[in-house]
Structures are given as C-alpha cells and as structure tokens.
Image: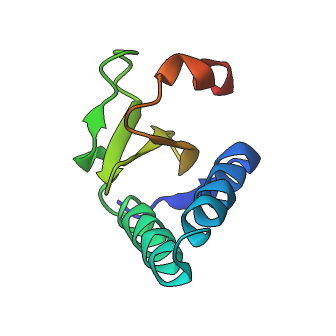
Amino acid sequence: MDLKLRWSPEAAEDLESIADYIARDSEYYARAVVSEIVSVSRTLREFPLMGRVVPELGDKHVRERFVYSYRLVYRVEPERVLIVAIIHGKRLLESITDRF
C-alpha cells in the first residue's frame, strides 16, 4: 500500500502546540519529538494498519501509534491516511471526538 498522507489542520496545530510546549524547556528535545512524530506518520503511507484500533472508539478505520508519550491518531481511508490528532497519552480522547 502506498496511500497519500494528509494532516488535518487540527493535527498540525497539535504538533505546533507540542513543539512550543517542549521548547519552553528544550529546543533540542522539541525538535527531536516533532521529528519522530513526523517520521512515524510517514510510515503509515505504506503500513496504515500497523497502529492499533483506538480502544475508546472501536472503529477499525481509526487507529493510533504511540510516539514517546503522545498518541498519533489517524483515520485510514481508501485513498489516504488522515492524521486527525496528536494528543498526550494522559489526555482524554473525548476532547477530540468532534474531529471524526
């Protein structure tokens, strides 16, 4: 599989917010975390089903990969993978359910 990879505007904002938050303490770690999140997201083009189904939703098309303490939540569609959100693992998923 080689699907297109797209980021929702909200997911892009999530990534920027994460970078800003981490950068308060360390620019280096902010870059490292963002780089790893982007790297993991790129693997989804070829292997979209490698992430687990999001347990709270139970929809086989909505999956997640963990990157450090963050959940990279994405939706597998026929032609693309859509990154929907990046949230901290301790944050409730209910706060982003309107994105689906």
Q: Which residue sits at x=72%, y=52%?
A: 13
- 87 left or right of 60? right
> Above or below — where is 23 with respect to 72?
below
- 84 left or right of 54? right
> Above or below — where is 32 with respect to 65?
below
> Above or below — where is 94 with respect to 16?
above
Residue 63 drawn at (x, y percent): 37, 36
Q: Residue furthest bottom?
A: 28
Q: How is the image coloured?
A: rainbow
Q: Nearer the viewer, residue 16 or 21?
A: 21
Q: Quadrant of the N terminus?
A: bottom left
Q: Which residue sits at x=38%, y=19%?
A: 59
Residue 72 drawn at (x, y percent): 44, 47
> Above or below — where is 47 with respect to 70?
below
Quarter location, residue 32: bottom left
Q: Which residue sits at x=40%, y=15%?
A: 57
Residue 75 drawn at (x, y percent): 49, 37
Q: Nearer the viewer, residue 21 or 43?
A: 21
- 75 left or right of 36? right
Residue 38 drawn at (x, y percent): 48, 69
